Amino acid sequence: MAQVYSVNAVGYVNLTIPKGFSMSANQFVAPSYKISDLIPSPTPGTILYKFANVGGYTLDTFDEFDLVWTDPNLTLPLGGGFFIFTSAPFNVTFVGEVPQGTLTTATPKGYSIVSSQVPQAGGVDTLGYNGEPGDIIYRFSNTSGYTLYTFDEFDLVWTPSIPSVNVGEAFFLFKGVANNTVWTRNFTVN
């Protein structure tokens, strides 16, 4: 008998989407990144805001009468994120394969919504994002709004501290320069 094993790791994350606005992200390799597959049954009337660096927001609403997304094919790729607004809290489970290998996320000049591709909490530096002078991270809290973290151009450190993010959390990243156009992380489970 030959020993057979898989190098793939699968997992899931249960997130509670709170009433009001919040930011979130899918951090698993899934068969489909369509909103209708990733978030199949939110609170009726829920609105998802997907941000594009050029062009602003694309909105998708979970129709309160037909109980379907207005654009069920809207995609929510790894490394991205979204704003979501709901009138009542609901739970969503993201499930799939944990991304491994060399993972890259585009970080274009200007604003973008990004997240770690790996479902892991920690400082952005631990998660592979090395700031550049002038970078600003905007973490959003449903109860207190934005907290800003700036990568100081003289001391080359995050102020007031290194931003720490949670599993399933997305955030705004502002890049004043386009030197580092990707967030690269090498990650393996084994």
Image: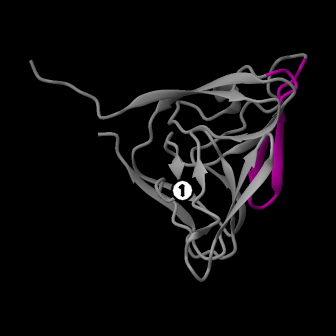
Extreme residue in the front direction: 160
Furthest residue toward right: 65
Up/down of 171 relative to 159, above or below:
above
In the picture shown, does residue 167 fall above or below 187? above
Magenta stretch, residue numbers: 43-64
Where residue 83 appears, x then y in whole percent? 77, 42
Q: Quadrant of the C terminus?
A: top left
Q: Quick one: 183 or 35, which is closer to the camera?
A: 183
Check if residue 153 falls in the magenta segment: no
Picture quarter with the N terminus: top left
Q: Image quadrant of residue 168?
A: top right
The three-letter code of the residue at mark 1 reads: Val
Q: Say which of 106 and 159 sits in front.
A: 159
Quarter of the rendering containing residue 48: top right
Frontmost residue, 140 versus 115: 140
Question: Percent position (x, y) of residue 85?
Answer: 83, 35
**What residue is at 19 percent from the left and 25 percent from the top?**
4
The answer to whether 13 appears left or right of 146 in the picture is left
Residue 133 at x, y = what percent? 61, 77
- Quadrant of the rendered structure where residue 23 is? top right
